[in-house]
Amino acid sequence: MNKTADYVVIGGGVIGCSIAYNLARKGARKIVLIEKKYLTSGATGRCGAGLRMQFGTETNCLLAKKSIEIYEHLEEELDYQGSIELKQGGYLLLAYTEKMVEQFHKNLGVQHQLGIPSRWVTPEESKEIVPHLNTQGLLGATFCQKDGHCNPFKTTDAYAKAASRLGVEIMTYTEVTRLLSRDGKITGVETDKGVIESPVVILCAGSYSKDLAATIGIDLPLTPERHQILVTEPVEMMQEPMVMSFYHGLYCQQVPHGSFVMGLGDPNEPKEYNQNSSWQFLHEMAAKVTFLLPPLANLRVVRQWAGLYDLTPDRQQILGSVPGIEGFHLAAGFSGHGFMIAPMTGRLMAEYILGEETSLPISMFDFSRFERGELYVEPSVV
């Protein structure tokens, strides 16, 4: 198989499908999206699926705010004959140190300037929001009712089906083995099924973006980091918001069908492509979550799994082109919050690739910021 395309999108997660759809919606044609397994087989299908506006940097707050606004009407926009299972039960972010209290108030200042309806709540008010919360040691929290949860599989399916109706060709079980370039221009991709020639390639393959970029001599500052998650049996609804503690490195939410989904971050996790789950995670997760939310001790675990964050040095995404390689674009390095901002990321990347003025500024997320030493650190991530 040798073929040509005007645009090649590498990666069949929610980011890739959102970009492909938005390019097609704007009139771009001959778009090919390539995924080495099935759609959502990477980070998207392994994520915690939370959506929150409560970030610490203005741009991430805006990306998340605009994305949630899109999520609220996504089924209608994409003419999806189903539900993406959006649940806006809020996010309760817990503070246990004076430093966290100070940072949370700074975050609230940024959020309020942007019209995000977040607020500071006392330990007592936190317990009113989540009655089974253990407030021992808690100094306070922030809460935003508009935050929530969405089904990543159905969301990606909605984008993929809408993209297909607009003429995007989706090639699953097709692995890109290397990028192709000549004289400072991208010329296409080589796959295990043949070459696809194209003057524009958009790389959004999560942690694996690093290996592919290296095939044309580009060193992406990405490192993989395993993050583990578990899901419990479904029970009667008892918790509306996502409970998140940066202090404990965990998040826990009850999804619409009644199961609890919870994950744990480990800063000492080796930076490698390890997606195996461990008993150590289960042990630590159980200890921490039953301290924070004691009634959950009675729940039975159905399964656990692991996925990869694609971390950058400032835990911020890389969006845009790469100097010296015309036609080559990146949407990678989301560091665990790609699903939250996928709708707006897809719109912005389509605008950027087509030479339009972007709806929100993205210049601070450019590839060259690392060489310049202009890191754009996001303080509010697990």
Image (tube, rainbow, N blue to C red):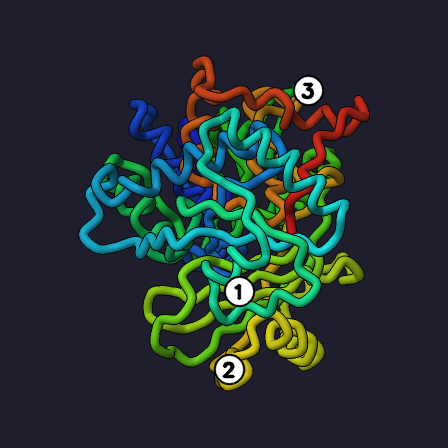
Task: Give the left or right position of residue 44, taking residue 102 as reference.
Answer: left
Q: Mark 1: which amino acid?
A: Cys
Where is residue 345 shown, x and y percent of the image? 47, 33
Q: Could you tell me which secondary element the residue under label 3 belongs to?
A: loop
Task: Give the left or right position of residue 254, taking residue 203 as reference.
Answer: left
For mark 1, what is the residue?
Answer: 252
Report the residue that reaches farthest toward the front: 124
Q: Quadrant of residue 189?
A: top right
Residue 128, relative to residue 372: is it above or below? below
Residue 96, relative to residue 55: is it above or below? below
Q: Nearer the viewer, residue 355 or 341?
A: 341
Q: Mark 2: which amino acid?
A: Val
Specify few, some or many for label 3: CA neighbours under 10 Å numbering under 14, 14-19, or 20 or more.
few
Where is residue 336 shown, x and y percent of the image? 59, 50
Sequence order check: which comes first, mark 3 or mark 2? 2
For mark 3, what is the residue?
Answer: 324
Question: Mark 3 and mark 2: span between their CA atoms?
Answer: 50 Å
Residue 217, relative to residue 225: is it above or below? above
Q: Could you tell me which secondary element the residue under label 1 belongs to?
A: strand
For mark 2, what is the residue?
Answer: 301
Where is residue 19 shown, x and y percent of the image? 42, 35
